[in-house]
Image (spheres, rainbow, N blue to C red):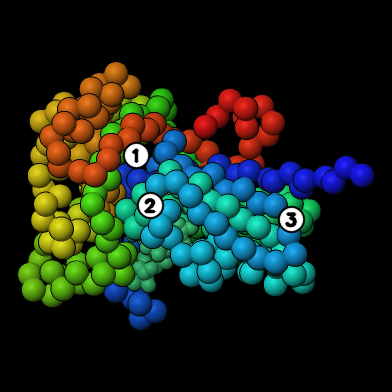
Amino acid sequence: MLSVVPRPVIVRAPSKVNLHLGVGDLREDGYHELTSVFQALSLGDDVHLTESDALSVHVRGVDAESVPTDRGNLVWQAAELLARRAGRAAGVAITIVKGVPVAGGMAGGSADAAATLVGLNELWRLGLDRAELFELGAELGSDVPFTLHGMTALGTGRGEKLLPVLSRNSFHWVIALAKGGLSTPAVFRELDRLRAEGNPPRIGDPDELMHALAAGDADALAPLLGNDLQAAALSLKPELRRTLRAGVTAGALAGIVSGSGPTCVFLCSDEDTAVEVAAELAGAGVCRTIRVAHGPVPGARVLDDISRGTEH
Ligand SMILES: C[C@@](CO)(OP(=O)(O)O)[C@H](O)COP(=O)(O)OP(=O)(O)OC[C@H]1O[C@@H](n2ccc(N)nc2=O)[C@H](O)[C@@H]1O
Ligand SMILES: Nc1ncnc2c1ncn2[C@@H]1O[C@H](COP(=O)(O)OP(=O)(O)O)[C@@H](O)[C@H]1O
């Protein structure tokens, strides 16, 4: 008799960069009030979900060895949360193929959790709508709703309340992965410490930046990129200053630390320039690895047969 191998549902999950990250004061619940303009990037993870008797997690790809394969993994928590909600057992074998650097400020773990919610909603035929998935996502982490949403969006609250932002054209990015990661809570704590000591300048509101996005104008966007967490990331990893300088010297329009870092991202005027900047940065020895990506791209989405064959 022929045994049928169950076919996985495969979900593509994007990474993110915060084009604008304004950090307000520490709230009583331990979170900071944020104003974030997120953009989803083509550098992503793939999450494979297959029916199984038990819950299991395997990880391969970039930085796989530093990703937990137990309850510490956000995909495990996402599967348990969804199973509880659906009143069923959390039987699923999950394989994550990492493309997003781990602890790099690019929301890789959040993207995997978003992919798991989307994929299990399909695999288990739960029929939850987008709003229900967003609500579950926000329970898992501040960045999970955006990695479900994708494209370009304004996030407020702790980053989980989202409004779409109009963005014309594709923007081209060079991504410089740093050696080692930075812990998100540690970077927020460092910012609180810097603010208690003095008054590091705060970025203003993102109105002008949103105009540049609507116009699809990379030259106008470049000087408006801003991140209140950058000072804290640089304080914890001063060598990132060299990386930021090297990208601009190589021909990028601007460079910025992505979210809580330590990944640095560089906006370039077009795809060819991005490839040139990437090559030059690779030779400068200021980072671990370089990637080229574009954005905006959609949020976590199931790959159909055609895209399974053509995307990578
Ligand atoms: C900073 C940002 C910017 O997009 O992303 P990363 O750069 O880490 O990817 C996010 O706010 C990270 O979101 P996420 O990684 O989901 O964080 P969470 O799990 O919700 O929170 C981890 C910890 O970060 C701190 N935190 C997070 C969000 C927020 N608005 N204020 C905070 O102070 C808190 O100490 C919290 O306990
Ligand atoms: N699926 C996952 N992928 C990566 N890291 C994960 C995952 N699940 C849990 N983690 C843990 O979350 C931490 C932060 O991961 P990540 O989401 O990659 O970074 P960031 O919060 O900087 O965007 C990692 O150090 C890791 O221990």
Which residue occupies the foreground of this view, 203 or 129?
Answer: 129
Q: Which mark is residue 169?
A: none
Q: Amino acid at mark 1?
A: Met
Q: Is residue 162 visible?
A: no
Q: Nearer the viewer, mark 3 or mark 1?
A: 3
Farthest residue toward the bottom? 28
Q: Nearer the viewer, mark 1 or mark 2?
A: 2
Above or below: residue 80 compared with residue 101 = below
- The structure residue drawn at horizontal position 58% and vertical position 25%, both measured from the top left corner, is 310
Q: Give the residue number, with chain letter if any, for mark 2.
A: 63
- The structure residue drawn at horizontal position 77% and vertical position 69%, both measured from the top left corner, is 88
Asked whether the residues under the numbered discs 3 and 1 touch, taking CB atoms below 8 Å apart as contact, a structural biologist would say no
Above or below: residue 127 compared with residue 17 = below
Which residue occupies the foreground of this view, 118 or 23?
Answer: 118
Measuring from the top left, give residue 114's x and y in whole percent. 55, 54
Disc 1 crowd, CA 10 A, few/some/many (<14, 14-19, 20+):
many
**Secondary structure category for the residue under label 3:** strand
Q: Earlier in the sequence, mark 1 or mark 2?
A: 2
Which residue occupies the foreground of this view, 182 or 52?
Answer: 52
- The structure residue drawn at horizontal position 20% and vertical position 33%, both measured from the top left corner, is 282
**Secondary structure category for the residue under label 2:** loop
Q: Amino acid at mark 2?
A: Asp
Q: Which mark is residue 210?
A: 1
Above or below: residue 271 compared with residue 22 = above
Q: Give the residue number, with chain letter if any, for mark 3.
A: 51
Q: Is mark 2 within 8 Å of ligand 2?
A: yes
Measuring from the top left, give residue 45's x and y in whole percent. 49, 45
- The structure residue drawn at horizontal position 23% and vertical position 22%, both measured from the top left corner, is 276
Q: Earlier in the sequence, mark 3 or mark 1?
A: 3
Farthest residue toward the top? 272
